[in-house]
Amino acid sequence: RKNVEDFTGPRERSDLGFVTFDITADILYGKNGLQTIFDWNVKQLFLYLSAEYSTKNNALNQVVLWDKIMLRGDNPRLFLKDMKSKYFFFDDGNGLKGNRNVTLTLSWNVVPNAGILPLVTGSGHVSVPFPDTYETTKSY
Amino acid sequence: LYYQVLNFAMIVSSALMIWKGLIVITGSESPIVVVLSGSMEPAFHRGDLLFLTNFHDDPIRAGEIVVFKVEGRDIPIVHRVIKIHEKENGNIKFLTKGDNNEVDDRGLYIEGQNWLEKKDVVGRARGFLPYVGMVTIIMNDYPKFKVCI
């Protein structure tokens, strides 16, 4: 985790977090989780991994770290290892340093062929504590 | 002939009432929009129709698909929320990006603007119908629908 010049915030420097992760997921549906979520009316799933946390500056922060489009016909099981975040994990301030409670959750948007667009959150989540100090150099 | 004119006027005013009623029920100034660009593919394509709601108490959360207008510009844009920072008092600033775009929408915002706020939101996408909006793309100035990128 670094403290980097951030041109998009009201202050000069903001915390930038780096996270690597593994995802093992089974996207199921139905009473016993036996039906596949890809029924006749599901065109695709838009999956995203978001980090949610609170800081002194902001009561709630949510940052999407990674996303993936899963089309009908793709395997609804995910086995991803050692993934790096796709998007910069900037905090609006310096709230990542020493933050013990950053929760990563996998959610998805069901895109139907026609009809309602629900957002579903996966049932597992992981808490990631951020260290108290900044990294000076690290290849990423 | 008198009846025909009256009949026609009835139809037009019922349609208008339904449209105005929709605006009130959904809380959005433009509850039905047409997708004009491919920036949300493969979820939405040009010509798809989106149904929006804009309830004031609905919180904006990462992953939601919102339709927003950049201040001063008339064109609504439909993209996904990828970052939010919300204060205790409910003040929220958020960033959006089209699924099919490489970069986030900062290039679309006003010069110097880096975040969107609740007031920029026209509505949240709740449902959609494919292809139906093609009609407006072809007809181009049908008064009932607002077009959307």
Image: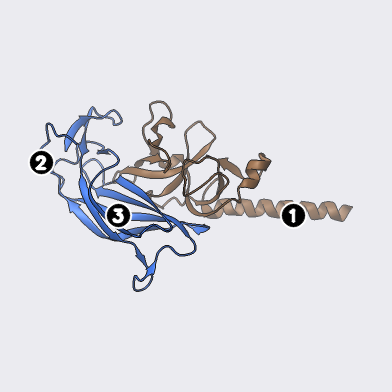
Chain colours: A blue, B brown
Q: What kind of residue is marked 3?
A: Leu
Residue A41 seen in render:
yes
Q: Chain of mark 2?
A: A
Residue B125 place in picture, x, y as percent: 48, 51
The percent position of residue B18, horizontal first and vertical second, equals 64, 55
Closer to us: A6 or B28:
A6
Q: Which mark is residue A119?
A: none
Q: Nearer the viewer, mark 3 or mark 1?
A: 3
Q: Which residue is mark 2?
A: A132
Q: Do tag 2 and tag 3 residues touch (Cβ < 8 Å)?
A: no
* Total labels drawn: 3
- Disc 2 or 3, which lies upstream in sequence? 3
The type of residue carrying mark 1 is Ile
Separation (CA) of disc 2 from disc 3? 26 Å
Rendered-image quadrant of the C terminus of chain A: top left
Residue farthest along the right direction in this orientation: B1
Q: Residue at x 46, y 52 (%)?
A: B55
- In the depicted structure, whether residue A8 falls above or below residue A78: above
Answer with left or right where residue B117 lies relative to residue B47.
left
Q: Nearer the viewer, mark 2 or mark 3?
A: 3
Q: Are marks 2 and 1 on the same chain?
A: no
Residue B146: x %, y % from top left: 59, 42
Mark identifier at residue A106 = 3
Q: Residue furthest left?
A: A133
Q: CA distance from mark 3 to mark 1?
A: 48 Å
**Which residue in the structure is indicated by mark 1?**
B11
Would you call the spot at circle 2 few (<14 residues within 10 Å), some (14-19), or many (20 or more)?
A: few
The correct choice, above or below, for B130 with respect to A123 in the image is above
